[in-house]
């Protein structure tokens, strides 16, 4: 967090960084308050988390409301991909080898489905580790 703050200070100065920090600190408090008190309205298809709303994605000059899953940190694109894999691609019915580029943690549950002995996520992590250890 300190590295992120110092980078923001370097990039945007004290005033903008102070405002950004206020938003970064207060937004999750507001969202979690609502998630504790209000009825469930959204469900994350990646991890199954249920709540009133997702956390906001906050950058300087930009706020993506209701965007980041508090449990698996998936963003809308990951949740759409997860739904597409299940509903349109029918991943549960597929077998064979898959080549997955830049799989995100939020898709772990979806990619771990299917083959009982070794899910796609396990295969991806094994290949990614092998690739990283070779320096590629
Ligand atoms: Zn999630």
Image (cartoon, helix red, strand yellow):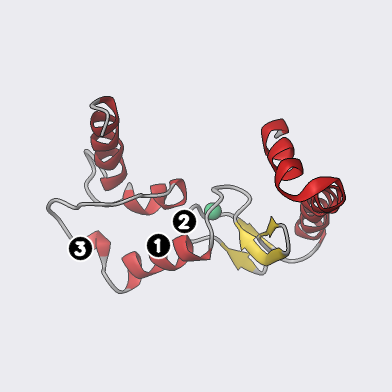
User: Which quadrant does the N terminus fall into?
Assistant: top right
Does the numbered disc 2 mark a residue whose Cβ is under 8 Å from ligand 1?
A: yes
The image's mark for residue 46 is 2
Image location of residue 125, percent across then percent down:
31, 37
Q: Secondary structure at mark 1?
A: helix
Residue 75, quarter of the rendered image: bottom right
Does the numbered disc 3 mark a residue whose Cβ is under 8 Å from ligand 1?
A: no
Q: Residues within 10 Å of mark 2 (few under 14, many from 20)?
A: many
Q: Is residue 39 above or below residue 25?
A: below
Task: State the CA–CA distance, disc 1 to disc 3.
Answer: 15 Å
Q: Residues within 10 Å of mark 1 (few under 14, many from 20)?
A: many
Q: Secondary structure at mark 2?
A: loop
Instruction: Mark 1 or mark 3: name the one nearer the start of the chain.
Output: 1
The image's mark for residue 93 is 3
Mark 1, residue position: 82
Identify the residue at horizontal 75%, vertical 58% (top origin).
35
Identify the residue at horizontal 80%, vertical 47% (top origin).
13
Image location of residue 66, percent across then percent down:
67, 65
Q: Are the residues flagged by discs 1 and 2 in contact, CB closer than 8 Å?
A: yes
Residue 44, quarter of the rendered image: bottom right
Residue 124, quarter of the rendered image: top left
Image location of residue 81, percent across then percent down:
39, 65
Q: Secondary structure at mark 3?
A: helix
Instruction: Mark 2 or mark 3: name the one nearer the start of the chain.
Output: 2
């Amino acid at each position: 967090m300190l590295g992120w703050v110092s980078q923001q200070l370097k990039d945007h100065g004290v005033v903008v960084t102070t405002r950004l920090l206020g938003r970064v600190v207060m937004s999750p408090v507001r969202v979690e308050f609502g998630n504790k008190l209000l009825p469930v309205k959204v469900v994350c298809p990646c991890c199954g988390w249920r709540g009133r709303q997702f956390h906001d994605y906050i950058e300087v000059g930009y706020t993506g409301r209701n965007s980041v899953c508090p449990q698996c940190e998936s963003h809308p694109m990951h949740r759409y991909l997860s739904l597409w894999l299940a509903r349109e691609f029918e991943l549960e019915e597929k077998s064979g080898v898959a080549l997955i580029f830049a799989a995100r943690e939020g898709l772990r549950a979806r990619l771990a489905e299917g083959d009982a002995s070794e899910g796609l996520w396990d295969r991806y992590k094994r290949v990614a580790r092998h690739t990283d250890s070779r320096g590629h």
